[in-house]
Image: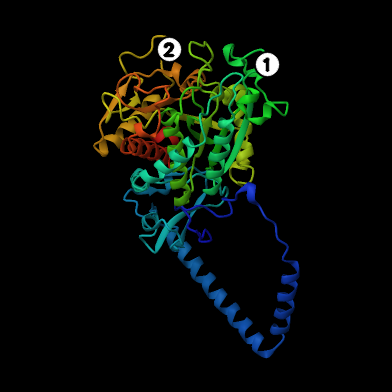
């Protein structure tokens, strides 16, 4: 994909921002520049060269004069339009701090395989756009209609065959348990596999390693997050054989300090291949990354993709904490350092001193087809009349996430069910404890699939139509949350 075309106030990335910090190459063109300079000096000292140079100067002055005239005329206009927006906004909408000026910008068709996204952003050859004069990292202002158009376009690109291929390859790596004193290293192999796949998609990654026990004690039984910091080589191995694990992160950066977190646990119980629980959710996140990277979106709010380690309890009947990996991510605000590592080459996020997690979207068991109500999709609804009594109330804003999911499912005429939230059994637990709006989306209506935590949880039990519908629902919501103002405009 050629990212060298500039499209201000479009959803296309600024190529100067979209650098992969793992693959930076610095080249020295000094000798080539010297050679070119010597040729240029000889040329401009000839009569022919002087004529050409004079013509260029005259032409440049004329272009600048036209641009100034256009800017003066346009400065009297109050209506701002962007791309195919039908919604208009007056210049008074923007604060004095932003000090934006109106300029005309010729739209350049991007050289991208994503032709439908190109059409969305280039329906007019000339458009008005906002150019911040004091802070180039001010968020873009897209209309709700435009964001919905982009979201609907991208959801249509979810590929069921890609989901099946990703899941087949993941299951071939073996059972991904984080058992205490485990005899298997399949989890670390799977983590490296997902990391490699994400890097193929040109998305940056980072692994946060932690220890969940030592030779005599399992930290998860007593919630010892403070002991989980990996220090020794074994603890940093991400290998369950060493009672170690890791969270894998991938970031698509935005322009503000707001972060939309979406996650799924990568580990399994010791007795199960984990096709549905939770390989289905893991590969859905990979597919979403593929689509967003292909679209080359320039986001307002960053999206942080999380592949959690050590979510499952180590043994049946254990009292260990559910979601130890996600809890470690939030413990002592560790996510602040993780974000700084992931955005270190982005000029806008680099200015941010503190990041704010807006919400968390959790995916769990999204591929089951052998439940009683196989075509139902469960979405947590905090307004449910049987909301868990041990929680006084859900984090503020959670209901907005529920309605965002419901909006897409209703629009597509997909059957869904508003479920009673049960944060104690998912990675949502850690986020609830921090007061972060969070919810889980899952498949089926009854309590558990017939192969839940069993050896029969393999690919034959996956309904890829259902899995695709849930993947689309999450993608639709992420586009709205990242291109807009987060929860505030939902």
In the rendered view, would you say 312 is above or below 155? above
| Position in image of residue 216 (x %, y %) | 67, 12
Indicate which disc, 1 or 2, sits on the residue closer to the N terminus: 1
| Position in image of residue 310 (x %, y %) | 55, 24
On screen, residue 350 versus residue 164, left or right, reads right
Residue highlighted by disc 1? 215
Give 391 or 91, whichever is nearer the viewer.
391
Give 80 or 446, whichever is nearer the viewer.
446
- Visible in this render: residue 151? no
| Position in image of residue 179 (x %, y %) | 56, 20
Residue at (51% x, 29% y) in the render: 175
How far is the residue under mark 1 from the one under mark 2?
35 Å
Q: Residues within 10 Å of mark 1 (few under 14, many from 20)?
A: few
Q: Which residue is farthest left? A: 413
In the rendered view, would you say 382 is above or below 31? above
Q: Quadrant of residue 441?
A: top left
Question: Of helix, strand and loop, which one carries label 2?
Answer: loop
- What's the colour scheme? rainbow
Question: Of helix, strand and loop, which one carries label 1?
Answer: loop
- Visible in this render: residue 113? yes
Residue highlighted by disc 2? 391
Nearer to us: label 1 or label 2 = 1
């Amino acid at each position: 994909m050629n990212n060298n075309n500039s499209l201000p106030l479009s959803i296309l990335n600024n190529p100067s921002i979209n650098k992969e910090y793992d693959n930076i190459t610095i080249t020295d063109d000094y000798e080539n520049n010297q050679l070119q300079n010597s040729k240029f000096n000889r040329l401009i000292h000839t009569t022919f060269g002087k004529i050409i140079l004079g013509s260029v100067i005259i032409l440049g002055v004329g272009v600048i004069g036209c641009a100034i005239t256009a800017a003066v005329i346009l400065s009297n206009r109050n209506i701002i339009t962007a791309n195919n927006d039908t919604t208009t906004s007056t210049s008074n909408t923007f604060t004095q701090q932003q000090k934006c000026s109106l300029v005309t910008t010729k739209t350049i068709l991007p050289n991208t395989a994503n032709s439908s996204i190109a059409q969305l952003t280039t329906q007019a050859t000339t458009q008005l756009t906002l150019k911040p004069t004091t802070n180039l990292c001010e968020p873009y202002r897209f209309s709700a209609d435009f964001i919905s158009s982009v979201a609907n376009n991208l959801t249509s690109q979810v590929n069921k065959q890609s989901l099946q291929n990703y899941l087949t390859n993941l299951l071939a790596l073996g059972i991904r348990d984080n058992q205490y004193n485990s005899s298997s290293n399949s989890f670390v192999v799977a983590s490296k596999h997902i990391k490699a796949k994400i890097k193929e998609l040109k998305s940056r990654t980072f692994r946060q390693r932690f220890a969940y026990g030592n030779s005599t004690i399992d930290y998860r039984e007593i919630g010892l997050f403070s002991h989980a910091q990996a220090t020794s080589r074994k603890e940093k191995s991400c290998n369950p054989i060493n009672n170690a694990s890791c969270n894998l992160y991938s970031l698509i950066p935005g322009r503000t300090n707001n972060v939309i977190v979406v996650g799924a646990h990568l580990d399994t119980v010791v007795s199960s291949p984990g096709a549905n629980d939770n390989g289905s959710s893991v590969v859905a996140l990979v597919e979403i990354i593929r689509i967003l990277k292909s679209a080359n979106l320039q986001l307002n709010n960053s999206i942080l993709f999380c592949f959690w380690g050590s979510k499952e309890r180590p043994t049946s009947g254990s009292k260990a904490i559910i979601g130890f990996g996600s809890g470690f991510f939030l413990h002592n605000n560790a996510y602040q350092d993780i974000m700084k590592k992931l955005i270190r080459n982005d000029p806008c996020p680099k200015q941010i001193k503190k990041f704010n997690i807006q919400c968390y979207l959790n995916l769990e068991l999204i591929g089951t087809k052998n439940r009683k109500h196989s075509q139902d999709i469960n979405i947590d609804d905090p307004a449910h009349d049987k909301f868990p009594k041990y929680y006084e109330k859900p984090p503020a804003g959670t209901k907005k996430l529920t309605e965002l999911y419901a909006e897409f499912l209703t629009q597509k005429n997909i059957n869904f069910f508003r479920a009673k939230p049960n944060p104690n059994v998912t990675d949502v637990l850690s986020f609830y404890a921090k007061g972060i709006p969070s919810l889980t989306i899952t498949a089926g209506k009854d309590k558990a699939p017939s192969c839940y935590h069993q050896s029969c949880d393999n690919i034959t039990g996956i309904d890829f139509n259902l899995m695709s519908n849930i993947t689309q629902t999450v993608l639709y919501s992420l586009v709205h949350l990242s291109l807009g103002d987060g929860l505030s405009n939902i």
